[in-house]
């Protein structure tokens, strides 16, 4: 008789909030933050060909080369990618057990997010977020499909750039962002 397998726990997801102490990430049903690293494939596919594999390795090497901050309390911050209105943004974030109070939440309106995080406000966003949330699936023919959905899972990549350096988006992260954009 086959043993009944214990169901696997769902993968943990994280959200973020900006407070006076910087960006904090915490467990949440929303998936708005990841610690920065990328999956790599062991062989090329239709949806992740050799060119994307090379680009992934290059971006990963850029992220790995970013010097870690070394000020008081900086050892607790992790290089993270947060979702800001459907676009990724590199930040130094602290992991916390509970959602902080106050500050700016990840689902604030775009004007507040841009102002609070000190993002460059591209002309394309003056009318609101340009990319709706998307989800993806892999078809049996090896084609990756992204479609509009209530929650994100497929991001059209164009990183946010900061209008000003901050404790959460340092000169090293601004430089890495520009290098990734050029890759």
Image: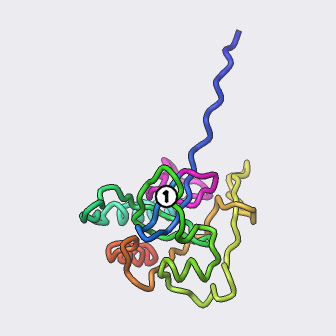
> Extreme top residue here?
1
The N terminus sits in image quarter: top right
From the top left corner, tell me how far across and down residue 41 is, in percent. 50, 50
Relative to 7, say whether 177 is above or below: below
- Return the residue nearer the eye: 132 or 141: 132
Q: Which secondary structure type mostly characterizes the magenta part of the structure?
A: loop
From the top left corner, tell me how far across and down residue 42 is, in percent. 48, 47
How many numbered marks are there?
A: 1
Q: Residues within 10 Å of mark 1 (few under 14, many from 20)?
A: many
Q: Which residue is drawn at 48% across and 63% down?
A: 81
Relative to 4, say whether 135 is above or below: below
For residue 178, side relative to residue 87 (left or right): left
Q: Residue at x 31, y 66 (%)?
A: 66
From the top left corner, tell me how far across and down residue 10 is, in percent. 62, 40
- Return the residue nearer the eye: 25 or 62: 25
Q: Mark 1 points at which residue?
A: 25
Determine which quarter of the picture holds residue 157: bottom right
The C terminus sits in image quarter: bottom left
Q: Residue at x 73, y 52 (%)?
A: 139
For residue 21, side relative to residue 136 (left or right): left
From the top left corner, tell me how far across and down residue 27 is, in percent. 55, 50
Q: Residue 39 in magenta?
A: yes
Relative to 107, say whether 8 is above or below: above
**Where are the magenta residues, as a range?**
27-48
């Amino acid at each position: 008789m086959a043993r009944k397998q214990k169901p696997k726990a769902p993968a943990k997801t994280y959200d973020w909030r900006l407070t006076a102490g910087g960006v904090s990430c915490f467990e949440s049903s929303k998936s708005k933050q990841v610690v920065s690293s990328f999956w790599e494939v062991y062989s090329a596919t239709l949806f992740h060909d050799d060119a994307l594999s090379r680009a992934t390795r290059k971006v990963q090497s850029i992220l790995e080369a970013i010097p870690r901050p070394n000020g008081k309390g900086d050892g607790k911050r992790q290089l993270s990618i947060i979702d800001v209105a459907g676009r990724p943004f590199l930040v130094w974030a602290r992991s916390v057990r509970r959602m902080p109070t106050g500050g700016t939440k990840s689902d604030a309106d775009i004007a507040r997010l841009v102002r609070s995080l000190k993002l460059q406000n591209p002309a394309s966003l003056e009318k609101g977020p340009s990319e709706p949330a998307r989800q993806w699936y892999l078809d049996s023919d090896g084609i990756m499909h992204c479609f509009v959905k209530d929650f994100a899972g497929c991001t059209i990549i164009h990183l946010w750039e900061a209008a000003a350096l901050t404790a959460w988006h340092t000169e090293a992260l601004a430089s890495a962002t520009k290098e990734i954009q050029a890759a």
